[in-house]
Amino acid sequence: MCGIACQNAGMDIVSSKPSGLRARKRQETLERIAETGLRLFSRNGYEATTLDAIAEGAGISRRTFFHYFKSKEEILLDWQLRGFSASLRKAVLAQPAGKVPVEVVRDAMLMLSVGFRTQEFISIDRVLRSSETLKARKQATYGLHEQALYATLMERWPDPDRGATLRLVAMASLGAMRLAIEAWIQAGGDRPVDSFLHAAFDGLASEFGKPSR
């Protein structure tokens, strides 16, 4: 009864395994390159770190590097943008029901803050502030973060009538996060970042007239 259909299904299963393995290896290589680059940026400085040094540290050729990143600047942008947005989306969608949107975002950010490695975060932020080009690219990513967070909130509350207010939540929440991280870095990272996040969101909530916790 199965015939060709079952044979094709079996072929699909077999062919999908190498494809999945390739994708996993590619992701592992990408992460290894990014981690090597970030480590070298923190230790030697952004300008002093060459592509050859990153490639050698990651155990790949210079040519292979360009299959993953167009430039060493992209490593910083990947760290700041794609990793954060994906992690925040997952954390937002994992929050339990019964919370208002700003509480969901706050608690998602608090969840992510547990994984912040203080000195690494501060060192990389210092690199991002080390040139006008990098500072401009850093500022530009905040708009992309806002779009990604807004899309996630709409995914959780798919009501077109709430679009404007959910965009406001995304803008205000990311603003609170930026202020919290700036205060945390200025304080040298001696206190947990979650205390700064709580303070920023408490200030945001007080301005809107509703206690956040």
Image (cartoon, rainbow, N blue to C red):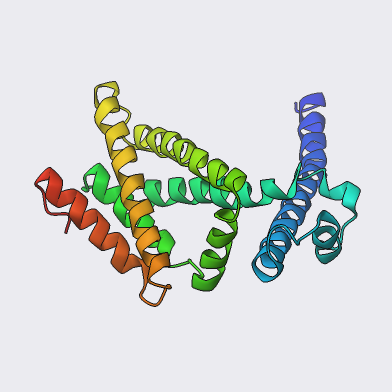
For residue 213, side relative to residue 159 (left or right): left
- Please provide percent x and percent y for residue 69: 75, 45
Q: Is residue 137 above or below residue 45?
A: above
Between 22 and 51, the one lying in front of the other is 51
Quadrant in which the C terminus appears:
bottom left
How many numbered callouts?
0
Q: Give how far across and how far down residue 102 sits, in percent.
A: 25, 46
Residue at horizontal 33 percent and vertical 39 percent from the top: 170
Residue farthest top in this picture? 160
151 to 208, vertically: above or below: above
Which image quadrant is residue 4 in? Answer: top right
Percent coordinates x, y for residue 154 in the rendering = 35, 32
Residue at left 13%, top 44%?
A: 208
Residue at x-position 87% and y-position 48%: 64
Q: Does residue 97 appear anywhere in the picture? A: no
- Most extreme residue toward the bottom is 190
Q: Can residue 29 be seen in this snapshot?
A: yes
Q: Is residue 148 left or right of residue 27?
A: left
Residue at the spot 35% in from the left edge and 75% down from the top edge: 191
